[in-house]
Amino acid sequence: MEQQPIQNIQPPQVEEINLKEYLRIIYQFRYLIVIIFVVVIIGTILYTYQQPRIYSASSKILLENQTTGADILMLTGQGSGKNYINNQIQLIKSKPLLSAAWEIMKKNPEWEAYPISSTENPIGHLGGIKVEALRETDILTLSYESTNPGEAMAVVNAIADAVVQQNNQIARLEYTTVREFLGEQLDLISRRLQASEEDLRAFKNENKIVELSETTKKWIEQSADIESQYESALTDQAVKARTLEVLKKQLQDQDSLMVEVDNVLRAPYIEQLRKDITNTQATIAKLRTNENYSSDHPQIKLLQEELSKTKATLDAEIKKYISKNLNYDPLSFRNQILTKIVQAEVDLEMARTQVQGLEQTKAIFEDRIITLPDKELQLARLTRSMALDEKIYGIMMEKYEDARIAEQAKIGNIRVIDYATRPDKPIKPNISMNLLVGILLGLGLGVATALIVHSMDTKLRTLEDIESYVRLPIMGTIPLIQESESRIIEFNQMIEQSEGENKEQLSKSLHYVMMQLVSHYAPKSPISEAYRTLRTNILSKKPEGSTSILITSPGPKEGKSTTISNLAITFSQMNAKVILVDVDMRRPMLHNKFALEKENGISDYLIDPDVPLKQIIKASGIPNLDIITSGFIPPNPSELISSPRTDKLIEELKSLYDYILFDTPPIIAVTDALILTKKVDLTFLVVRCGTTEKGIVKRARDMMENVNATIDGIIVNGVYVQKYYSKSNYYYYYYYYYYYYGEEKPKKQKKANLSFIRKNKSIP
């Protein structure tokens, strides 16, 4: 009878593995996971204790925002903000600063004990300094790691000192430039003064002239004063020009700046103040040409005070204009430089005006001195030159000292607020962290390995594998039947020592044991109970009337013949009439299991229409169970099975028996089973745990689907109970093979064994 094919059977690859499946896999490979976990933990511990001890030291530096006022020379601006902090971080890691830190470190008394002292590239090692900005602050944290705690402290402190040192040098750059320029000028004036003194002394000795007239002395004194002011003015002009040049170099966008400078200088009020300053300077210079107006004259002092007030007003107006018209920000480095450039431009203009005025005054006194007699004129010039050099030397010396003091007093905007101390404990290795990582890594590797091994396993290992992969109902699970070699030897000894009927009974019983017909020789065993459970499940699918059942397997050595033999015995124990037909006409097995002759079997019936059915039916020796052996091996088994003669055989058997069981070849090997599935009522597939390949099962399913055949269920054979099931779930699946040869039963005397055999009525 034809049945509907299996519906909605999808390959197992498309099914997502759920959490329960993951947990099952983990439990299945728990020992592998534990081994990998232990190995990783041991490796982590060994790695941790083999790591060198690393110490870390840290210090903190503060980036102060400084806005200084004007002094005798110029202003220096310091910027702040995110970019400024980032720039400082990069400067700290630069090679020049690290080189400076290296020089500081070499002065440490413990220098030779540090590992860095013996390295080929110590500056490169110093580059390992870590610089981090504390959030919402202007504080930088410097940290360094080393195997030597003293070295870690020394490196951090040396770099911190180098940072401060370099910052001071940068802050003093403008002052240093002015001091160096004044030093050069002072050296020139000193040499010129020496020459003037020597010339004057030589002239007096040569011409026997001792003194000048009072008028000439007064002219010379005034002329020298004017000349010294002129030289001082020239120096101031040069200093202001040098200052302006340095300021301009500090600004990146110079073109844009100069446009803003011109706008400030052309402001009406600022321009008027500039003119007032120029006019006042010209008035002072004109008055100095009069011999009655010395430098301490009240009117000249009044004009100089007026000049200072006008200059102060101009500076204030410049700052006011920039703040109003150029969005001035006091913390902005650019606006600070802009203010100073504008002031420097004004100062330079004032210096130039003063130089021009002093040049005119100087020329007037030169004209007066020329009117003197020749020798007196020459003496007057030499005297004036010496007096001039003395005054200029005094002025330059004063300016130089002021510049030097200003340079030394100027400090940068970076200072150390917390020097590093010698660390007591290493920061690496972190034992707790390493163990945590080892635990996570061990578990992860263990689980990953288990999943990989499971995914690469091509065999059906567990019931869960079979259920998830085959996706067919499991009709029964048959435990692995194992014979005790010692029991078999003992049984053979009993046979040798027996005679007559007992010997024959023992021989047949041993045959059943060897053929694994456990349902017959041990009907009370757990394995027999498993076959009865299988029988019950099959009966739930049994149609009314006589039932034909086909048992096959995807491949060879699945235990198909043993399964169908024991199943047939359990059906016969219901007092039902059962016949077992060996349709495997290629490698028949049933005749061996029941100790029957193979000849005169189903092949004879299918080939010869004259052979009656009763001729091929053989008694099995077990009540209610008959056997049809395979007969001779025909050349065309598939053609014989597909013939109408097979249909006639099934009809005849259904009229004589309640259950007809067919033992067929594997599906993958030949097509015999596929042909017969269209002729029987129920079809079951036997698979063996740990043996059957997943691919073979899938191929068998596909072949059944191609012929529209139905698989009514799966019989799982060869289940190792202790490996796959717990006692709580399958209490009867303990390590107990069969009733007669119970492993937990102590050995008995031979008479006791014989007595047991006689009591077991199922054994002939």
Image: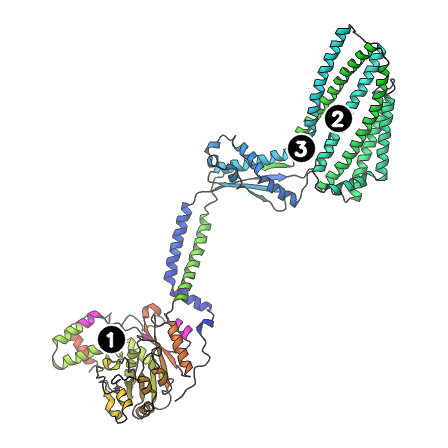
CA separation in Å, label 3 and label 1:
106 Å
Residue 342 appears left or right of 136: right
CB-based contact (under 8 Å), mark 3 and mark 1: no
Residue receiving disc 3: 173
Q: What element carries label 1?
A: loop
Dot in front, 1 or 2:
2
Q: Earlier in the sequence, mark 1 or mark 2?
A: 2
Question: In the rendered view of the protein, which quadrant contains the C terminus?
Answer: bottom left
Q: Between marks 1 and 2, how big is the CA–CA gap?
A: 125 Å
Identified by mark 3, the residue type is Leu
Residue 528 sits above or below residue 614 on the image: above
Whether residue 69 is visible, yes or no, is no
The disc label shown at residue 235, or none:
2
Element on which disc 2 rests: helix
| Position above or below: 507 against 49 | below
From the viewer's perspective, is the residue at label 3 or at label 1 nearer?
Answer: 3
Q: In which quarter of the image is residue 366?
A: top right
Other-residue count near label 1 (Cα within 10 Å), few / some / many at <14 / 14–19 / ≥20: some
x and y, in percent, of residue 505 in the image: 17, 80
Magenta range is 462-489
| Residue at the outermost front position | 374
Viewer-nearest residue: 263 or 195:
195
**Residue type pointed to by label 2:** Thr
Q: How far across and down, in percent of the image, does residue 515 sit?
A: 24, 77
